[in-house]
Amino acid sequence: MLLSLTLFLVSCAPPSLPSASVQAPDAFRNSTTVPTGFALADGSRSLTFPADFGAHEDFQTEWWYYTGNLENSEGRHFGFELTIFRIGLLPPTVQLPQDSKWYSHSLYFAHSAISDIASDDFYAFERYSRPGPGLAGAQAIPYRVWLEDWNIMEKTAGVYHLQAAQEKIALDLTLSDELGVVLQGDQGFTRGGDNPTNTAYYYSQPHLVADGSLRINGASYIVNGLAWKDHEFSSGTLDKNQIGWDWFSLQFEDGRALMLYQLRNRDGSPSDFSSGTFITGDGTPRTLERPNFSIRVLHTWRSPHTQGIYPANWEIHLDQPDCMLQVKPWTADQELHFPAVTYWEGAVHFDGTCDNLPVGGNGYIELTGYAGNLPLR
């Protein structure tokens, strides 16, 4: 759910490209505008794999997002994030000059972060690159997404290798998909508002078994745990009345999983387009819509870096299954504060009950629009 983090880069597109009226089918008959040459997510396409693991250059914004909770043999806990974004500067229909490899339809940027819970330390880094002569890119077969030496690559079917290193931190992980792809929303099509451009295509791989190593300040740790992948692409924006979102990915110890996003209106109320998916142990998704779930903030945390006030403890209630979950960050300060964007992205743990049986697990939460210079519109 990082769509609006990318909007400042969209402004890099040449101003000579106008907007054009796009007629959307059936439920989206009202005309709207998207940049000329880019596609509108309208629910008309079916997601297929492995083709949709790769880039979608006919859409303007896209990201491949990995997070997870890890431990070493002594129980030392870590969180990690590796996300690579693609921004369409020009639609693929525009022919580029041939006199330089640096001309490109897209710009890539990436975020890598590690939370070291025992030392209460959080490390986060950012990179940018045009594809240029092989510096960044994304492809479906064989699956690979990269920005310089930050790399996500399929080793064999359903097994992926993640690598990222910068300054004090490095991660080197193998992720094995034991559940498969889950299509979010309506067969991978999601809506975030009334406007036909408040839409996206979105799927997850919510149960990736992780093994590998981390390096932090010269110390190496052999780790294992669980990771989560999201891939989302669109040419849309937030609704004009929305200021941000709270996004949750929770992995239960019994193999189930939960994705929720609560879009926030400018008056602080949750948008009616907030949604989610409860995923059973065999990968069957059940769509959750308001008012079939609620998220209540129990405590807040003030960032010493930006003075932003973030939620820091949550109570989540689901109707089906009947769940009451208490969710807490593993450590409070997991705020990514870069020159262009600021958001909180961190490892969490939870416990509670589902259908009167005890449950627990770990997850990740993303909070936007609470601090800093996040350009939402």
Image (cartoon, rainbow, N blue to C red):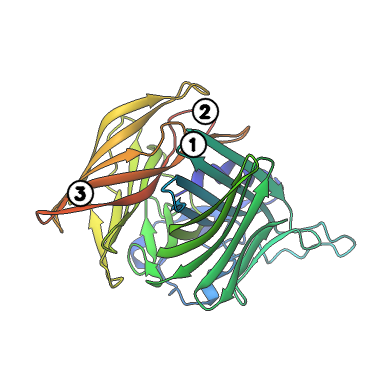
On the picture, is 295 further left or further right than 371? left
Give the Cα separation between the discs numbered 2 and 3. 29 Å
Residue 260 place in picture, x, y as percent: 31, 51
| Residue 56 or residue 221, whichever sits in front | 221
Give the Cα separation between the discs numbered 3 and 1. 24 Å
- Residue type at tag 2: Gly
Give the SS element for disc 2: loop
Tell me which corner region of the image, top left, top right, bottom left or bottom right, holds residue 373. Answer: top right
Q: Earlier in the sequence, mark 1 or mark 2?
A: 1
Tell me which corner region of the image, top left, top right, bottom left or bottom right, holds residue 289. Answer: bottom left
Q: Could you tell me if the residues under marks 1 and 2 are in contact, i.e. CB atoms within 8 Å?
A: yes
For label 3, the residue is: 293
On the picture, is 92 further left or further right than 162? right
Q: How many marks?
A: 3
* Residue found at the far front of this picture: 74
For label 1, the residue is: 343
Q: Residue at x 81, y 62 (%)?
A: 133
- Residue type at tag 3: Phe
- Residue type at tag 1: Tyr
Please tell me how crowded label 2 is: few (under 14), some (14-19), or many (20+) other residues with Cα within 10 Å.
some
Q: Is residue 23 visible?
A: no
For label 2, the residue is: 372
Residue 258 place in picture, x, y as percent: 30, 56
Give the SS element for disc 3: strand
Please tell me how crowded label 3 is: few (under 14), some (14-19), or many (20+) other residues with Cα within 10 Å.
many
- In this view, 122 is above or below 23: above
On the picture, is 201 further left or further right than 60? left
Q: Is residue 302 visible?
A: yes
Q: Residue at x 41, y 35 (%)?
A: 331
